[in-house]
Image: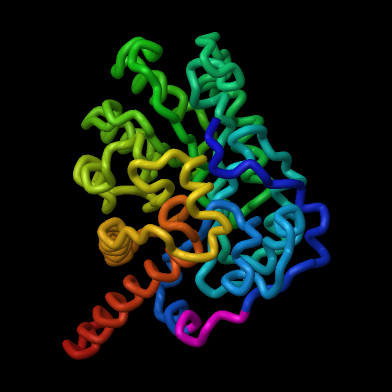
Amino acid sequence: MDTQLGLFPDATHAGRSAVGPADPPAELRDIAARLPRELRLGTSSWSFPGWESIVYDRAASESALASDGLAAYASHPLLRAVGVDRSYYRPLTVKQLRAYADVVPDDFRFVVKADRLLTSPTDPGSPGVRARNPRFLDAAYATAEAVQPVVEGLGTKAGPLLFQFSPIPAGLLGGRGAFLERLHLFLEALPKGVTYALELRTPSLLTQEYVELLDATGASHCYNVHPAMTPLAKQLLVVQPFYQPVLLIRWMLRAGLEYETARERYEPFDRLVDEDPLTRELIARTVFDGLLGEREVIVIANNKAEGSAPLTLFRLAERIAGWSSASSSGRSARGGP
């Protein structure tokens, strides 16, 4: 099981915040003011007590933050998106999603994971047992349990609906071509007008045929930093970010670590433990290029990337803001728009 995030209780206390936002330093406010509004940065969940004084103004339990922390999280000038992973293990209802949407600003975006039943050819609830999963790439189930709740519950605050495909042995797919054909039919059968994103964790599926599938269906590739997947640099070469409807990047897990190992190493997620400047630079450049191409850009960071997701994003934002300011100054000096 992906242990990235397990706790997303119902937002039943959304109307009364038990925690307030931390007061960001003037430097972070200045950085936020210099970032283009097309760029949204966010973390995987918001319910981490170690973020006291980073995101929240006081100490609070994980359960209290899960129930009441979203409004405070969304008040931070640099946090304008969040990943919702709870739905990967069980679909969320319209009521649950609407409760989230009600406490965030209009320009905030949620990146919701679709039910893992849709992306696993075998029953994900039975590890080690290769029982056939009848919900795999079932468009009717996806529409009823993933698409419609997101559309009705989040409305304009919905970001891409994410289909995460964990590593899949090629033999279970009937071959790469058969899988891509079935995936194509699945995407074509889903409701139109919704942004769909695909996150692969099987490197052999990252092919020109996959790129053609994206072009044909209008889905976006989710660029991910995860040890199971092809390195980000190669993903960027195979799937050109300039042509993605939405540029979605998820910085998940440092190379050489498992989630549980990373969690033990990094808790309580209040500092950067293993900084990764090379990945930060590559993501920053990719984001900047996407913004120059007038793309909507969303970057989601996990605590297991460097030790603290908010601090990872703050460093990333600083780098991007520097380029944005330099680009704006250059245009002004040339008399350009």
Residue at 39% over, 51% down: 249
Residue 209 in view (yes/no): yes
Q: Residue furthest front?
A: 265
Q: Is residue 93 left or right of residue 254?
A: right
Q: Nearer the viewer, residue 251 or 174?
A: 251
Q: Is residue 121 above or below residue 264?
A: above
Q: To which quarter of the image does residue 145 belong? A: top right
Residue 191 in the image, given as x and y percentages of width and height? 54, 35
Q: Considering the image in quadrants, where does the N terminus appear?
A: top right
Residue at 70% over, 55% down: 62
Q: Considering the image in quadrants, where does the C terminus appear?
A: bottom left
The residue stretch that appears in magenta: 23-29
Q: Nearer the viewer, residue 220 or 2?
A: 2
Residue 285 in the image, given as x and y percentages of width and height? 26, 63
Residue at 50% over, 82% down: 29
Residue at 71% over, 72% down: 58
